[in-house]
Image (cartoon, helix red, strand yellow):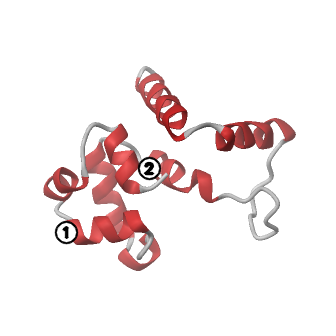
């Protein structure tokens, strides 16, 4: 999922996110399109975006990075259980609309903690 999609799930868009975070829309669009990443923009940009979206930086990180995990990639340094691999593969098999619904439900449920 990219930043534009995640912002939409949070009820906003890149222009409004730019106004609320103080980050130029051009930077947010570059992040969304993959032309740049948070390694090049810095942690302050990441924190400003997560704050403007009303989520923790952890939530934003995992929402944006989830699809980037390649289960068989030897460079990934996290150990996944078989169940976690199955869940990731099931998520990947969903349509974009189903993924959006799942993310909205997960975000809504996490707010109730």
Which residue matches tag 1?
Answer: 24
Q: Is residue 76 above or below residue 53?
A: below
Percent x, y of residue 41:
36, 75
- Please report whichever mark, 2 or 1, sits nearer to the chain's N-terminal start: 1
Q: Residue furthest bottom?
A: 40
Q: Residue at x 49, y 35 (%)?
A: 97
Percent x, y of residue 26:
23, 71
Q: Secondary structure at mark 1?
A: loop
**Label of residue 60 in the image:** 2
Seen in the image, is 67 located left or right of residue 85? left
Q: Secondary structure at mark 2?
A: helix
Percent x, y of residue 44:
32, 67
Mark-to-mark CA distance, 2 and 1: 18 Å
Of the pair 34 and 40, the residue shown nearer to us: 34
**Label of residue 9 in the image:** none
Q: Is residue 78 above or below residue 11?
A: below
Percent x, y of residue 100:
47, 36
Q: Is residue 18 above or below residue 107?
A: below
Q: Is residue 6 above or below residue 18?
A: above
Front tag of 2 and 1: 1
Q: Crowdedness of circle 2 by 10 Å Cα count: few (<14), some, many (20+)?
A: many
Seen in the image, is 73 located left or right of residue 97? right
């Amino acid at each position: 999922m990219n930043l534009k999609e995640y912002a939409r799930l949070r009820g906003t868009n890149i222009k409004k996110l730019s106004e609320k975070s103080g980050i130029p829309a051009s930077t947010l669009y570059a992040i969304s399109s993959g032309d740049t990443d948070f390694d090049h923009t810095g942690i302050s940009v990441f924190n400003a975006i997560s704050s403007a979206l009303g989520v923790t930086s952890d939530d934003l990180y995992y929402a944006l990075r989830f699809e980037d995990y390649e289960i068989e990639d030897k460079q990934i340094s996290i150990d996944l259980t078989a169940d976690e691999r199955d869940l990731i593969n099931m998520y990947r098999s969903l349509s974009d609309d189903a993924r959006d619904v799942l993310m909205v439900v997960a975000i809504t449920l996490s707010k109730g903690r």
